[in-house]
Amino acid sequence: MIARIAPSILSADFSRLAEEIAMCEAGGADLIHIDVMDGRFVPNLTFGTKVIAAVREVTELPLDVHLMVVQPENYFEDFAKAGATGMTIHTEAAPHLQRQLARIKELGCKAGAAVNPATPLTAVSEVLGDLDLLLVMTVNPGFGGQQFIAGSNGKVRRARAMLDKAGSSASLEVDGGVDRATIRGLWEAGADTFVSGNTIFTAQDPQGEIEELRKRCVTDA
């Protein structure tokens, strides 16, 4: 299993976004995480189609678009056209989850489902065969820079067991409070994709921070 680092531009300096993304690329980032918030599903308002398109213009890295919105299906076509590589929707906002995942795939994108800290993994148990990515939130979504919720490693471990039992090849992503102190435990629990925003973009050496995070995701000989 190879660790993938996904810097979240929620914490980037938008006055120099192209430079920030170039820095992430130079640091070895595997994908760029874009948090879309609508001010309804979560108490914050962030990016939309134009930002996705702008990021697509300056990088060839996969764009990992995380929809923290109600009625996510209203955004699928526009985000796909703007250059999203994958779209992850919240189970809490997707009563027709299987159909919505299928639609994302029809548009040529990878389909992911996210579960909030209080949402049980059973929320995705019936769609494991439809997932390209399962996102376990390790903070309550809505804001960057939050503290990692203690006990999240156990949920990640259960998610890995669930995917393995189903024979799923879906990525297991974690988002929230991922830093040097928490990433090793998440890696050992079975996560393979790590979203990190504040930790990377506020570091003295953001490019080096990506490498530091990756170094902690190695299997001891």
Image: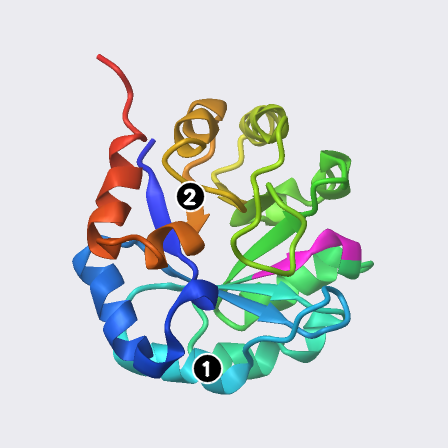
Q: Position of residue 160 (x, y in %)?
A: 55, 28
Q: Quadrant of the N terminus?
A: top left
Q: Tell me the SS state at disc 2.
A: strand
* Residue 186 vertical placement versus 6 (above, below): above
Name the residue nearer the viewer: 85 or 219. Answer: 219
Residue 60 in view of the camera: no
Q: Quadrant of the C terminus?
A: top left
For label 2, the crowd category at 10 Å Cα-Cα, with few meaning under 14, some 14 to 19 and many 20 or more, is many
Q: From the image, tell me which residue sits under label 1.
A: 51
Residue 206 in view of the camera: yes
* Residue 39 vertical placement versus 119 (above, below): below
Q: Position of residue 41 (x, y in %)?
A: 75, 65
Is 20 left, or right, of 66 in this rendering?
left
Which label was assigned to residue 186?
Answer: none
Q: CA distance from mark 1 to mark 2?
A: 23 Å
First reached walking from the N terminus: tag 1 or tag 2: 1
Q: Is residue 91 magenta?
A: yes
Disc 1 versus disc 2: nearer the observer: 1
Image: magenta residue range: 88-92
Tell me where residue 2 sits by quadrant.
top left
Q: From the image, tell me which residue sits under label 2.
A: 193
Residue at x 43%, y 55% (from the top left corner): 198
- State the count of labels: 2
Residue at x 56%, y 24% (from the top left corner): 157
Q: Position of residue 171 (x, y in %)?
A: 47, 43
Is 206 left, or right, of 171 in this rendering?
left
Amino acid at circle 1: Val
For the view shown, which residue lies furthest in the top direction?
Answer: 221
Amino acid at circle 2: Thr
